[in-house]
Amino acid sequence: MAVAHCILNQATRWWNEEKGRDPSKGCLWKVVKRLDELGFGVYQLPCPEITFLGNPRRSMMRGEYESLKGYQEHVKRLSLEASSGIEALINMSRRPRLKLMGLIGLARSPSCAAKGVEPGSYPGGIFFEELLKELKRRGLEPQVIEIDIKDLEASISMLDELVIRSSL
């Protein structure tokens, strides 16, 4: 599974010290635990937002990120690097043979939302859109799901559905 960076490192999510909001810490252990129980390894994707703006940073919408000079190029470069890393792991694995089963994003993230990359849905994350284009160009078409921090239990059940869909 290729996983949005902040699922494994909550400290990269935006926070604003001026409003008294402390940074999140740790990882979303329920998600990590379920991935482990299902036998999935994890490939941590880069965080385009922190690698471009750092922390703390203010909360921004997709359109604001799109208007940042250099952000689109940054995202494209990260998409190429991540795709190359994933492809190398797959191509160099023999026993056990690795496979990219899924791409896990974060709901409402301007860069890493996953649902919006499906036709007919709300706009997805800028990074995930570019990443999926690049993975598809390389012949990799993982299933896409997203984790919603506001409803972790439902999100975790989607991991179970992923296993069922992949075994069909």
Image: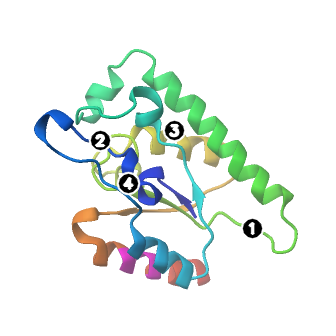
Q: Which residue is mark 2?
A: 14
State the CA–CA distance, disc 1 to disc 2: 32 Å
* Earlier residue among tags 3 and 2: 2
Q: Which residue is mark 4?
A: 10
Q: Which residues are magenta?
A: 156-160
Magenta stretch contains residue 157:
yes
Q: Measured along the vertical axis of the image, is residue 155 above or below residue 146?
A: below
Badge 1 local density, few (<14 within 10 Å), some, or many (20+)?
Answer: some
Q: Are marks 3 and 2 in contact (CB under 8 Å)?
A: no
Q: Nearer the viewer, residue 46 or 10?
A: 10
Query: Residue 165 at x, y = what percent?
Result: 52, 79
Residue 91 falls left or right of residue 44: right
Label 1 residue SS:
loop
Residue flagged by tag 3: what amino acid is it? Glu
Query: Residue 116 at x, y = what percent?
Result: 35, 50
Badge 2 local density, few (<14 within 10 Å), some, or many (20+)?
Answer: many
> Split into 4 quadrants, where in the image is the C terminus?
bottom right
